[in-house]
Image (cartoon, coloured by chain):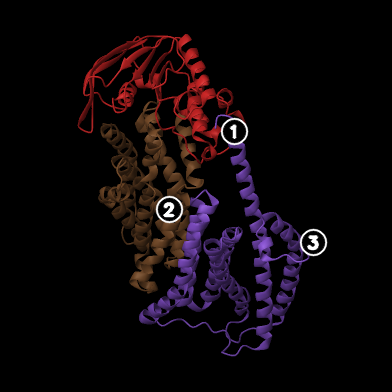
């Protein structure tokens, strides 16, 4: 399975954000999307996730099953954490695991892996920003999908959190998964590909 | 320094307040039971109304319920001032505990009033001045309770509800008068006969006894509710502490 | 199907917890119905005659009140983005949300109807008729409202605009709901005709609502 993008263009609010962006990412490969603010890093990720329509160009998933579009093979982690404050930590993760993945998934191991095991029953409203981010990252562990689309994954994370994320990424890549990340941070990866946006305006 | 009396400021400390409540609550409960025993006995002895028969004795529940429905809002208003003006830490706990009690007593007043009036009116409800202003009071209580439920953080919720309570306190006499005018414009108000303008002692004494009994009941329940609310907030603080103590914050 | 039931369960849990909308809908219904006698006078005979209409209008407005947060809440915290990447079709997910909304906000209205009918001097037969028509018709209100919620999801003045868009679409439901209730009470007109049309409207909205709402959401993406 590989993602092939050719000649992608993005227009938001009438303004052309980028044009003629092309890349190929294959299994076990990571692509870091870098660039100044406003260059369209988030928009590119949303394009790949199917949340935005491209103004030009194409994105294709080569080698995936014909019935499953790219969006349904990918896990998208945006700026927002998609957490409900009134639900407990465990309930939040369990919901997404059941809705996006597999009904039988037990969220406890994923919570423990991100260091939130002790807080499973606490309402999410009491979490700090870093803890909320970790809970969002727990989704990556609990739900098995081969493509990860991460928008600023290290936001609000402390050093321990960033190390945990780096471990997660390495595991995903060694399992043959694909990672696309918009980030200012090298994320602790050895040799990621880089796509720089925003140089040509 | 040995404390032989506790002042209001001392009660501001929740732990000290809880200790006081624990000591008082069994006495209050006993006093309530005793007062009800006296009151019910007096009601049993009271004469029937020449027109309505025994149903007039619903009054012995209806009047105290109405009184407590208003009393609770007055209590909430004083507590609201305590929150906004004097910043007394337990004022909002008192206010939050009083709201459901006030709503319950107002509802009891509405239901007993409806049952009492049905033989006379033929229906369970008429839009007369007294009943309607009680209904509006009930809706205001529900609004306060809904507002408490909407905001998670207790101190912020307390300030917002305090403002609503004070506005409501101003509104209640206005509603009472406006409904009187509204009713006299559209329809003659139905008259509830209690037995004349001078109330005979055989009815007055049991009525006062029931008033005292119900007020003691209110105080017992109110203190218990305040204790529960303090416990609830402690649990919340503990949860927050646990969340912030865990690494990754 | 477990994904959809997880979604329904989550929405219903959220509705009854702090900040949820379940109780507020019933309170609004209560207040609206109480306001009407203030406006038209305490004439019990008149209130009894127009009682079914008052209850229907109150239920309509109360149902509408809670709807604008239905999709907007998920949009605001990023949950909607994730729902779009699920293997469950968006149409089904939206239908599940609407059903959960009706169960947690619409059903309590029907439960509260007998109490309010008492205030409006309706007898048992009238109360039953109104409750039955509400049971058949309020799902239609929710599923039509779903379309409005999807159309206004990203707007600031969403709530009011939603009402303006949706209320005209709910007029047929209101007409047949009140007609069915009055037919059951008066007995002069056949009850079956308006009632079956009401049920048909509901069934149609169960299908049209989610599809239209999903289309609105997809086209609303930039």
Question: Residue C150's x, y, as percent?
Answer: 31, 39
Does A140 sit above or below residue C102? above
Question: Residue B133's x, y, as percent?
Answer: 46, 72
Residue C72 shows up from this direction: yes
Does A191 sit above or below residue B161? above
Instruction: Say which element carries label 2.
Output: helix
Q: How far is the residue under mark 3 from the one under mark 2?
A: 54 Å
Q: Which residue is mark 2?
A: C25
Q: Are marks 1 and 2 in contact (CB under 8 Å)?
A: no
Q: Which residue is mark 1?
A: A119
Residue at position x 51%, y 23% from top?
Answer: A142
Question: Residue B30's x, y, as percent?
Answer: 76, 66
Q: Quick check: C14 left or right of C169?
A: right
Question: Residue B193's x, y, as percent?
Answer: 54, 84
Q: Quick check: B79 left or right of A145?
A: right
Instruction: Kindly identify which chain the residue marked by label 3 belongs to.
Output: B
Q: Is circle 3 on the same chain as circle 1? A: no
Q: Which residue is mark 3?
A: B2
> Which chain does red denote in the image?
A
> Which chain does brown denote in the image?
C
Q: Colour of chain B?
A: purple
- Label 2 environment density (alpha carbons within 10 Å; few <14, some 14–19, many ≥20): many
Quarter residue A178 falls in: top left
Q: How far is the residue under mark 3 from the one under mark 1?
A: 43 Å
Instruction: Say which element carries label 1.
Output: helix
From the viewer's side, name the closer residue of B244 and B135: B244
The image quadrant where one finds the N terminus of chain A is top left
From the viewer's side, name the closer residue of C56 and B106: B106
Q: Which of label 3 and label 2 is nearer to you?
A: 3
């Amino acid at each position: 399975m590989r993602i092939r993008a050719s000649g992608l263009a993005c227009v938001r609010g009438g303004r052309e954000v980028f044009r003629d962006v092309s890349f190929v990412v294959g299994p076990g490969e990571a692509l870091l999307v870098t660039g100044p603010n406003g260059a369209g890093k988030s928009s590119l990720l949303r394009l790949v996730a199917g949340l935005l329509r491209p103004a030009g160009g194409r994105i294709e998933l080569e080698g995936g099953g014909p019935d499953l579009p790219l969006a349904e093979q990918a896990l998208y982690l945006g700026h927002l954490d998609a957490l409900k404050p009134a639900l407990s930590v465990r309930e939040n993760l369990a919901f997404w695991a059941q809705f996006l993945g597999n009904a039988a998934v037990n969220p406890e191991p994923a919570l423990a892996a991100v260091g939130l095991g002790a807080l499973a029953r606490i309402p999410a409203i009491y979490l700090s920003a870093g803890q909320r981010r970790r809970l969002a990252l727990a989704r990556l562990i609990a739900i098995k999908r081969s493509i990860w689309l991460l928008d600023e994954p290290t936001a609000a994370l402390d050093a321990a959190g960033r190390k945990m994320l780096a471990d997660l990424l390495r595991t995903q890549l060694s399992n043959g998964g694909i990672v696309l990340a918009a980030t200012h941070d090298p994320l602790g990866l050895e040799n990621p590909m880089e796509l720089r946006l925003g140089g040509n305006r | 320094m040995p404390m032989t009396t506790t002042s209001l400021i001392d009660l501001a400390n929740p732990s000290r307040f809880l200790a006081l409540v624990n000591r008082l609550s069994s006495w209050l409960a006993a006093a309530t039971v005793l007062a009800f025993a006296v009151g019910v006995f007096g009601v049993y002895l009271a004469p029937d109304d020449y027109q309505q028969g025994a149903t007039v004795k619903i009054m012995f529940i209806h009047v105290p319920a109405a009184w407590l429905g208003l009393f609770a809002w007055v209590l909430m208003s004083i507590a609201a001032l305590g929150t906004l003006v004097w910043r007394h830490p337990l004022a909002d706990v008192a206010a939050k505990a009083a709201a459901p009690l006030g709503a319950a007593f107002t509802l009891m007043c509405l239901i007993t009033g409806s049952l009492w009036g049905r033989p006379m009116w033929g229906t369970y409800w008429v839009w007369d001045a007294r009943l309607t202003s009680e209904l509006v009071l009930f809706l205001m209580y529900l609004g306060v309770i809904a507002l408490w439920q909407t905001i998670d953080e207790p101190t912020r919720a307390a300030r917002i509800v305090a403002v609503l309570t004070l506005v409501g306190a101003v509104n209640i006499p206005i509603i009472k008068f406006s409904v009187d005018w509204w009713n006299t414009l559209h329809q003659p108000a139905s008259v509830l006969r209690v037995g004349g303008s001078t109330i005979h002692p055989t009815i007055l004494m049991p009525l006062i006894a029931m008033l005292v009994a119900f007020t003691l009941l209110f105080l017992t329940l109110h203190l218990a509710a305040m204790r529960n609310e303090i416990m609830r907030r402690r649990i919340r603080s503990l949860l927050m502490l646990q969340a912030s103590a865990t690494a990754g914050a | 199907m477990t994904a959809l039931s997880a979604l329904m369960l989550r929405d219903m849990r959220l509705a009854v917890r702090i900040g949820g909308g379940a109780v507020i809908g019933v309170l609004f219904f209560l207040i609206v119905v109480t306001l009407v006698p203030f406006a038209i006078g305490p004439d019990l005979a008149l209130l009894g005659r127009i009682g079914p209409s008052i209850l229907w209008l109150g239920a309509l407005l109360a149902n509408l009140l809670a709807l604008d947060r239905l999709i907007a809440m998920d949009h605001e915290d990023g949950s909607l983005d994730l729902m779009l990447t699920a293997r469950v079709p968006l149409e089904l997910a939206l239908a599940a949300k609407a059903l959960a909304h009706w169960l947690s906000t619409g059903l309590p209205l029907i439960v509260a109807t007998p109490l309010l009918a008492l205030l409006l001097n309706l007898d048992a037969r009238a109360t039953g008729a109104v409750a039955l028509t509400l049971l058949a018709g309020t799902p239609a209100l929710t599923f039509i409202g779903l379309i409005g919620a999807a159309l206004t999801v990203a707007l600031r003045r969403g709530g009011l605009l939603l009402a303006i868009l949706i209320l005209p679409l709910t007029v047929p439901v209101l007409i047949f709901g009140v007609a069915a209730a009055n037919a059951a009470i008066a007995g002069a007109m056949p009850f079956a005709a308006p009632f079956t049309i009401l049920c048909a409207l509901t069934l149609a909205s169960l299908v049209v609502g989610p599809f239209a709402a999903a289309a609105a959401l997809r086209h609303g993406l930039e």
